[in-house]
Image: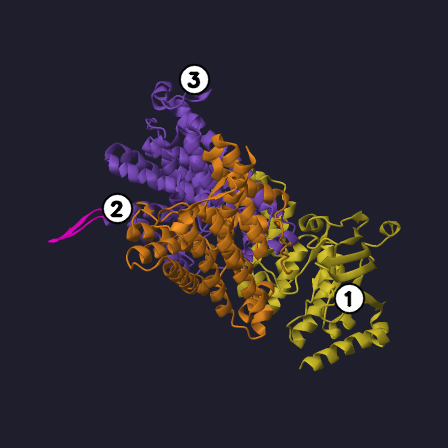
Amino acid sequence: MKREWRMPLTILSIAIFALFIWWAQNHLNAYYIRVLSTAAIYIVAAVAYNLINGVTGQFSLGPNGFMALGGFTVALLVLPVSQKQIVYFLQPLIWPFNSFSLPQSLFIVALLLAGIVAAIGGIIIGFPTLRLKGDYLAIATFGFGEIIFVLANNLISITNGALGIKGIPEYSTLMWTWGWAIFSIIVVSNLAKSSYGRAMKAIREDEIAAEAMGINVFFHKMLAFTVSAFFAGVAGGLLATLITTVSPSLFMFTMTFNLLIIIVLGGLGSITGSAITAVLFAFLQELLRTVEAPIQLGPIHLPGVAGMRMVVFSLLLILAMLFYRRGLFGRKELSWDLILSIFERKGEGVGTTWKKEKMKLS
Amino acid sequence: MDIQSFIQQLLNGISLGSLYALIAIGYTMVYGILRLINFAHGDVFMLGTYFAFYLVMIFMLPWWLSATLAIALSAIVGMLIDRVAYRPLRSAPRISALITAVGVSFFLENAGIVVLGARPKGFPRPEFMSHTYNLGGAYITGVSIWVPVISVILLLVLFYVIYRTKIGMAMRAVATDMETTRLMGVDLDRVISYTFAIGSALAAAGGIMWACKYPQINPLMGIFPGWKAFTAAVVGGIGNILGATIGGLVIGIIEIMIVAFFPALSGYKDAFVFVILIIFLLVKPTGILGETLKEKV
Amino acid sequence: MEKGKNEAILTMNHVTVVFGGLTAVNDFCIDIQRGELVGLIGPNGAGKTTVFNAITGQYIPAKGEIFFEGREITGLKPDRITKYGIARTFQNVRLFSELSVLDNVLVSYHARIKSSFWEAIFHTPRYLREERTFYNGGMELLERVGLAEMAGETAGSLPYGQQRRLEIARALATGPRLLLLDEPAAGMNPEETRQLMDFIKRIRDEFGLTILLIEHDMKVVMGICERIRVLDYGISIAEGTPAEIQANPRVIEAYLGEEERENAEA
């Protein structure tokens, strides 16, 4: 397929999709809009998570912590001052958050700040751990998520403790969530495909060899981790303004676990794979709600079992790792070439194409 | 703070610390051999307490027998986890085994919620653990005395196994150089199995004593002690059993002392361990006793 | 210091590397002149690879100093040293096995990138130009080493001999002036070895390289090296031309000793 065709095709399909989103926002009922938005938020978080775990090969368990940072940041920024006075009845909210709130027109600023706060958190965690070889990142990020939970419960004058913050304006429309989803896919897959991404993949494959080829390992791990934390923070902010409340328990480890399932099933290292499984997962999660609800099978009544969904998900993850480790896409990306190669015969290798181009030039 | 209450707190810290040490040993042994953070280890600790709970409450077994059986059952669970979830991934990229470990951990926690119920259960602690002793004016509960004593006994048994038995020698050999040890005809899978069994047994023993100290058990009780114990293993020098013991004691004592000296900060006591971890990773990532693990180039 | 100032491209002064009490390399000194092809030989475990690791920064020497083109590089991080102009291959091939052959080579160009990652993300013209230059350079290089046909294959799927060749190509792509080859002929059949010898001589001339190589295959060492250094138990025991080394009684003793050891084990 001709290279010049790819860009217009991509733009065209994004335009068609944008039309669909616009239609959906106006015609679908609130339930479907919420599921679709959740899917988009999963995309933002999962695609970013895949950058550090799948592309760079560094095992992070941090997204829930970064999403919490982003979620609380947005909540503090956009919650109306009057609502703040109602919510914070245990202890008053600290200055300056008690005296202002961003209008809807500045929602984008709130989201960017959410991403920046999370990215700073990422730098703080990444600096001590990513210099070291080994799995210190995993243990530090896991602890970080738990510590955010502890802090959110205790810093009542900022987070309102275990009660959380209610009444956040519902700014996250489908346009916002899907806009960010598409933006994150473009940014992360461009990064992964770029020279910087190649360096990250080299680190995943063999850290010592990558270093010996002149790659600054620490810098590239930090870059991947910080970008990943930024988008996780944005995802947290979108989530806060979708469900209109944040509380410490919203950002428990389960969130990271869900994202882990998504990136494993989509194929560690495949950005588009994560995006597709993120959508599937959002719907699967809704379907599996029925598992936890009471079931009436004729005369037999099965009481609902809380926690059953997570049992199913964890088994799914273990089985995928044992028997289906490459996931849906392996490390391939969904691209026009891949779609067309299903219809066409096998394409030419990079080498022959290059030779042809060279011949044309001479 | 007067000297009596200081001693009281110190003993308290030592008893908490020896529990962290018992859990940390399992992490450090597995990491030393497989370079794998066994996330499910904290959940084996939780299972140990439930085994003991049901053996006492339902099977009405005497306390010492329940505890012994619970430890044995946990050892089997530990071996099973390795057999089913980790062994097939020995030659896979390391991140695969880590992800699986997270999966197993989450499975045990949620299966625990489904099967055992999310509501905390009161743990039936034996009388000698809850009894209060008066030692020269300082009032000390049985837990603070017996936990360190039993832990020391367990540690002595462990060191005997590691340094004086054939399987212990095999474990040390595998941790030093897995490939060479395998070439010399040692059955790696068997050695790794025993490692999981020993680590899980110690975690279960720690769990049962934990439940005597904090007699409320629930399926998620293993998460925090597990993570702190892993931090203890890092602080002590990952891969080093004595280091894990020291790390556990250090973390336990610091945690108790922070709460004792700064009661206002008690809500943050779990956060301090995190700060300790980050400081160690910045200043001395090899831990108190650890040597630099050099990767062969 | 005085040695660091002469014409040598690489100078090692009294370098000692210790692993927890065990001295792997003891008081190692060497001067390598620009354009030379030097062999480093010795029985197994003599510390040859450790010398490489000390030069490239994987290990930090306990004592001694290392100069490259008059600049001290002792204790610098491996990526810095590579950027200064030293590249290496590994004894047990360490390719990025899941990446394509072309990508393996392109990774080495990354250290020279001028565009920031922002430009890379948003595909600015400057970035696209740079990427194009890398791509052309990488393909050019692959063609010169005879791997252009395989550019799109996964590196791990190549036959062993080609993997070794790709590793050398990857090292060349970093633009080195000094190339360290760690047992390049290991596991090759006589025909492949013969091709490899020609290949090494050819790249030295074409790329204007200085080469230091570790090799067990005496045909290779004697056939292409102009100067040979012999290590045993971490200590230099001899240096000279191939002819001199072959006649040196201490070298013969060291190698015979190894054979005796092997016989005793068998």
Left/right of residue B99 with respect to residue B239 in the rendered view = left
- Where does label 3 land, which residue? A99
Q: Chain of mark 1?
A: C
For chain B, the rendered hue is: orange
Mark 1 and mark 3 in contact? Answer it, CB < 8 Å: no
Q: Secondary structure at mark 3?
A: helix
**Label 2 – label 1 distance at C-alpha:** 68 Å
Mark 2 and mark 3 in contact? Answer it, CB < 8 Å: no
Compared to residue B141, the image places residue C184 above or below, namely below
Q: Nearer the viewer, mark 2 or mark 1?
A: 2
For the question of whether residue A138 can be seen, the reply is: no
Q: Percent x, y for residue A277? A: 36, 49
Q: Nearer the viewer, mark 1 or mark 3?
A: 3
Judging depth in this view, the residue of A255 and A24 nearest the camera is A255
Q: Chain of mark 2?
A: A
Which residue is situated farthest in the left direction here?
A299
Q: Percent x, y for residue A61? A: 46, 46
Q: Amino acid at mark 2?
A: Arg
Left/right of residue A170 with respect to residue A130 in the rendered view = left
Compared to residue A125, the image places residue B113 above or below, namely below
Work out which quarter of the rendered image holds the C terminus of chain B and state it: bottom right
Judging depth in this view, the residue of A126 and A107 nearest the camera is A126
- Where does label 1 land, which residue? C39
For chain A, the rendered hue is: purple
- In the picture, the disc for residue A289 is 2
For chain C, the rendered hue is: yellow
Q: Which residues are drawn in magenta?
A: A292-304
